[in-house]
Image (cartoon, rainbow, N blue to C red):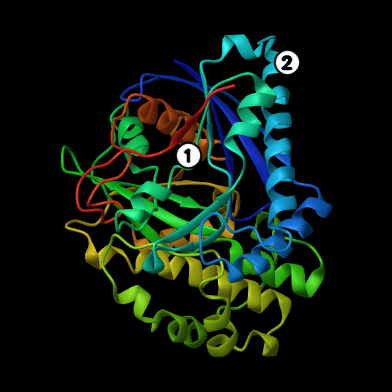
Amino acid sequence: MRVVGLMSGTSMDGIDAALIETDGESVAWLGSAITRPIDAKTRALLVTAMEDARGVNHRDDRPGALAEAERRITDLHAEAVRALLEPLRLTPGDIDLVGFHGQTVIHRPDARLTVQIGEGQRLATALGIPVVADFRAADVAAGGQGAPLVPVFHQALVRRLTLPQPVAVLNVGGVANVTVIDGNAPPIACDTGPGNALIDDFLKDRTGVPFDADGRAAARGRVDEERVAAVLADPFFQLPPPKSLDRNAFRRAVAERMGLAGLSVEDGAATLTALTAATVAAIVPFLPRPPSVWIVAGGGARNPTLLAMLAARLKAEVRTAERVGWSGDALEAHAFGYLAARSLRGLPLTFPTTTGVAAPMTGGVLFRP
């Protein structure tokens, strides 16, 4: 099948659209991809929607700005698909399926609640292509963490590589998540902790710039290891996988334990970047064997300061996704194309070792034009 996968991550900086050819088991081709930046007005709307989502008690609730944000984000995803296809001289009739993750606004698996805004039917009608959406809900309803969803895709990709195992695939978006593949053993996966979210929020508050470009501010700063250790004392980091996080899970803990107001922009950025690296390294003691190679994707892969900190703390080889022939920026978009194909075939998306669900299970909802 030729599928378009779509991803709008917790960093809220852009929408990724990517082509993939797959049967939901093997990957025949990782195709072209684009990123459509999210404009400032829409980002502000999403920030408001995330605040309003704190009042959500049922996954269909849309208080405050959520309904407007849902329509807006859906229409932007339709634009992203068209923008991907047009220069390739492809039409909607050339595409078999779209995988639409939507925008996560709340993720509380402890309450069996996860909400990704995005109207699958609206998107399918706008594009004239069948759409699979709502990937996480079934797993969470069954008692799983609902995240991460991409390990089965990572496993399919790693099978194509000749690398010493175990291999860890680390995605650093707003939240960081990892998949560890070791031969034919079931993949182990979890969210590791804050990814770019805390760094982005700190830079936005201090400078008005929504991220630390190329890790330059962090590179000029000094890491306060005591502040890093204070956050690492949180019980989340003592839990084995599987486990998952909401984007804003550590905002309060960082405010209370790190005292960033007393640090310069550079030292604050360095300390938060070190925190991301340290929380990734904190997962290693829970693994059967430490990974030999870490493949880093997502926005964090463009941050050389973070990559250097990861290499130092992991004491292992760290490669970017591009170095192994993947698109670091589009990897999750490719993944949701793959997962859409699996969903259509009724194949499992989540597993006991990846989300903690009791048995392997499929997910996603199909919307037809």
Q: Decide which of 208, 145 is in the foreground and name it.
A: 145
Type of amino acid at the residue the image marks with label 2: Pro
Give percent across and percent down for residue 348. 28, 36
Q: Is residue 51 left or right of residue 138?
A: right
Viewer can see residue 219: no
Screen quadrant of the N terminus: top left
Which of marks 2 and 1 precedes in the sequence? 2
> Could you tell me which secondary element the residue under label 1 belongs to?
helix
- The residue drawn where x is 37% and y is 47% is 138
Pointer 2: what residue?
87
| Quarter of image, res 313 | bottom left
Determine whether 14 is above or below 260 in the image.
above
- Give the CA distance from mark 1 to mark 2: 25 Å
Q: Decide which of 170, 236 is in the foreground and name it.
A: 236
Screen quadrant of the C terminus: top right
Pointer 1: what residue?
321
- The residue drawn where x is 68% and y is 90% is 262
**Mark 2 Cα shell of 10 Å, populated few (<14), some (14-19), many (≥20):** few
Give percent across and percent down for residue 357. 26, 53
Viewer can see residue 359: yes
